[in-house]
Structures are given as structure tokens and as C-alpha cells.
Amino acid sequence: ESSSLMDHHHKYLSFPLLLPYTHIPLTPTSISLSYLYLLYIYIYTHTRTQKANSHETPHSESIFQPKNLMYKEMGRHDTYQKLIFFCLSILLLHNVFKDVEGLACNWGTMASHPLPPNIVVKLLRDNGFNKVKLFEADSGALRALGKSGIQVMVGIPNDLLATMASTVTAAELWVQQNVSQYISKYGTDIRYVAVGNEPFLKTYKDRFVHLTFPALQNVQAALVKAGLGRQVKVTVPLNADVYDSGDGLPSSGDFRSDIKTLMISIVRFLAESVSPITFNIYPFLSLNADPNFPREYAFFPGSGGAGAKPVVDGSISYTNVFDANFDTLVSALEKNGFDPNKVEIIVGEVGWPTDGDPNANPAMAQRFNQGLLNRILQGQGTPRRKTAPEVYIFSLVDEDIKSIDPGKFERHWGIFSYDGAVKYPLSLGNGRQLVPAKGVRYQAREWCVLSPQAAGNGATWASSADYACQFADCTSLGAGSSCAALDSVANASYAFNMYFQRMDHRSGSCNFNNLGTTTKIDPSRGSCRFPIQIDTSRHETLRPRGNSGATGVKWRTVAAVAIVVGCAVFN
């Protein structure tokens, strides 16, 4: 009899165990569904076991029911229970795959002719990005992201830190206008508020050091008051220079001495709020800042090239600077009493530019970003922290009005050009490749160049070219850049055209004291592209329709698992 009972338990517990093991994100929805799911399994198996036991005794047959009718009713009830179980399984699976699949990137809007937000949202979805980071609460972007299935980190610029730090009321107003409104009115899935952006950079000379933590506390209090404390978390994107190592080895990592106490307070506050810490890591800058930096060490192993000589740190050998940099942070956390495996860590920015510097070109960017994507898709951690961090690629598209104080490469970080064109191929997993933006409309197919008659008067047109570059982006003309090989005449033509495009082909914008002329023949040469700008006045409002990208992959995965669960349940 005991053997029979164990057989029944095994039979009715078998199909839940067929579900695949998955790391379920601890969101309120997933927690609720998980509890409901487990509760139903208990009720179902307990009921079935009782029925099985009662059915085995002579008294199990009711004196008021014929035996076949009793079995019919039991069978019908069993089918209903299986159907409920099946539906709960699909709900839980949908929530799991909704939260864990897809890629993340930064969407910057510092462009003279930005792509329309709806086109960008479709570009994100078509390429499997389901998480995006904004540097400010851009209204057009936040509206377009509504009901898109894309999770959002919205930023508070450094210039607003003083306001946010002043009073909780100021933070409450910002949250109401830039978070609550978009969640309730547009269905925008805002998950994080980034308070400031790299506020402790040494170049800021302590300008934001005493503002960041109070601002962080006030924004958190405002989110709680708005009823969003569980749904929306705060964080502070920090540059990797907030930690360092005395001997250059990751195991010696610690927070920067001048802000160590502050960093400990911020990390503790975020950990207690169940919020992530965010750090930006740039192997490109490591290579670019030091002429003696080993080039191969900037790239991931297996991404091409000869590979770097390992940096040995005790029992660990580091083959790339990303791992070493991240593990320096891990050591800093450990040294100050934090368990890095219990603190959520986000890499807020990491990428490689394609122009504006000898180390910035499409080939190097493709090599680095493909290696990065491979790690993300494989869920790969680092030697000191096996759990993979959430990683936001920097960045989605080029931005032609960004400050170039750090370098001319600053305007060329995008994996897509200013117009959403693919710069270089990237494999996104599951046989997917990058696809360009759709529905982009351009200005007339016309360029501005130096007229043949003016080509002999070099002194005159050189000053005109300098004038053009004061108002347009000429960073591609620098040494080692994509247009560095142009002769002086073509150099002036490039400058003229960039100004002409920036001014939307306005009358007189190709005059330059009668030195310029328009042409319908593309003057691009080799790697140097003479662009035609986006016509921002001619775009339709394009709402993303249907499911694509990560959303489509998610549903295909859920459907496949649903078939397996269905076969097990209704077998």
C-alpha cells in the first residue's frame, strides 16, 4: 500500500519537474506567479493523492452514484485542474522570458538631426534590444517607448543634481513629471532612475561630490511616496575611476581614497534599497590614454588577433582589461565589507568608437563589440564574480553635437550611423544580424563642394572651411580618421558639405563667398563618406506594430516550452 502511494506521488509530481531550470528575476510579478504556481502544484498533488487513496478502498464508491458516473466526474475535474496548471505554467514562463532575454544599450540624443523616436524604438526591437538607457527624460523617447516591451533606465543630468539634493519636494516633482506620468499615461516600462552621470569624475573638481548622495536619497524617497519603490530602482552611473589598485592588480582594488567614505555610503544605501550599482568601463580609453598599453589586452580572447600576454594575479590570469577592471571593483566591494555576489552590478556603458582617432575604426569596433556580445549572450561573468552583470552597450547611434573635450571620437560611438545605417556586421545570436533603421527620410540628394573655379585660391577657402567646421561636425577629418587622407580641396569640400547638411540645405548655406557650389554627384571617397542629413520635418509617426526582435524570440521560446509542458500535463 505504501509503495502504491509513492507511485501516485511520483506520477502526479512528474510533470512540474519537466519545467526547465531558469534564473527567475525577483520582480513582484514573477514572485507572485511563482507562489501561485507552487501553491497550485501542492493543492493539485494533495487532492490527487487523496482521491487515489480513497479510490483504492471499498468505501470510495458513493451509494448515490453509479461507478462509471463517479469516474466520469473525476476525469472531468482532473482535466480542469490540468488546464489551470497549464495556464499558470505559461504565465510564469512568459514572465521569466520577458525579463531575461534581449540586449541593452544606451540611446543618446545629442544629435543635430536625431532619428524620430518611433523609428529608434523599432530599430531597437528589430535588433533584439529590450533594455535601453536614456541620459535624460526625453519626452519623445519616453512616449515612443510606451508599451514597446522595452525596459527603460531614465537619467537625471548632473546639472539637476543640486535641485534634486535641495528638497524631497523637488525630487517628487521630477518623479511625477518624468516617471509616474509616462508609466501611467503611456505604459512606459521604467525600471531605473539614474541619478547623475559619472558625477565623481576628477575633471569635475568635486563639483558634484556633495550633491550626488542627497539627490539619490531624495529621488528614492520620491519614488517610494509615488508608490513606485518596488517597481523603479535608483542608481548612480559612475566612471571606473572611482576605484583603483595600488599595484595594478585587481586583487588590490579599493575605492578612490578621496571619495572612499562616500562610496561606501552610496553602495550601502543602494544595497539596502535592493538597487543596483552602475559603473562604466571603457577598454578603448585605457588603450587610447597610454601609448604603452598592450593593444591586444583591450580586446576579448577569441575575438581575433594574437591574444594578450596574461596579467597574473595570484591564481588568476587576466587576458583582457575588461575582466581586470571589473574585478578591481569586485575587490573594492569585498575590501569594504560587501558581498559582490549579493550586490546587483550593472555595466552602464561599454563600447568602441569607429572614427575620430587612429584607434577608432569599424574593424576594431566590430572586433570589440562582437567579443562583448558573445559574452553577454553566453552569460559570462569574470574570474572573481561568475554571475554575469547586466551590460548596456555604448551606444546605439552616433551623436554629432556631443562635446569633443575627451576626444574627437566622442561623436562616433554608435553601432549604427546617425541615420540608423549598419556600420559593421554583428552577430546577435540565434542566427540574427544587425538590421538598419526603416522609414528614414533624407534631405534632397545634393551635396555642397568647393567649386572648381575656387580651387586655386587656397588661403580663401581654407578660412571658409574653418568657419564651416565651427558649426558642423568635422571630426572625421582628424589624423587617423576616416577622411584624413583627403587632399586640401576635398577637405574643404567635406567641411562645406557638413555645414550645408547641418543647415538643412538652406538658401545661401553653400555660398561661402561664392566658393561653394552644389552637386548631385556623390563626392564620397574610399572610407570617407559625405553624408546627406536626415530630413526631420518629413517623418511620419510610426508606432511599432506586432512583435519582433527579442519579443518575437521570447514568444517562440515560450511556445516551444508550452508544447513540452502541454504534452506532459495532458499525457
Image: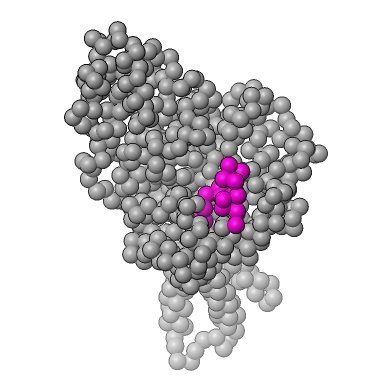
Please tell me whether residue 414 is drawn above or below residue 179 in the rendered image.
above
Q: Quadrant of the N terminus?
A: bottom right
Please tell me whether residue 14 is drawn above or below residue 430 in the rendered image.
below
Residue at 42%, 24% in the rendered image: 476
Place of residue 227 in the rendered image (x, y in percent of width and height, measured from the top left): 47, 72
Residue at 46%, 22% in the rendered image: 478
Prevailing secondary structure class for the magenta stretch in the rendered image: loop
Residue projecting furthest to the top = 456
Q: Which residues are magenta?
A: 194-210
| Nearer the observer, 189 or 127 | 189
Quadrant of res 439: top left
Residue projecting furthest to the left = 507
Residue projecting furthest to the bottom = 63
Place of residue 401 in the rendered image (x, y in percent of width and height, measured from the top left): 39, 37
Place of residue 408 in the rendered image (x, y in percent of width and height, measured from the top left): 47, 30
Q: Is residue 563 shown left or right of residue 328?
A: left
Q: Is residue 563 magenta?
A: no
Q: Is residue 291 shown left or right of residue 452?
A: right
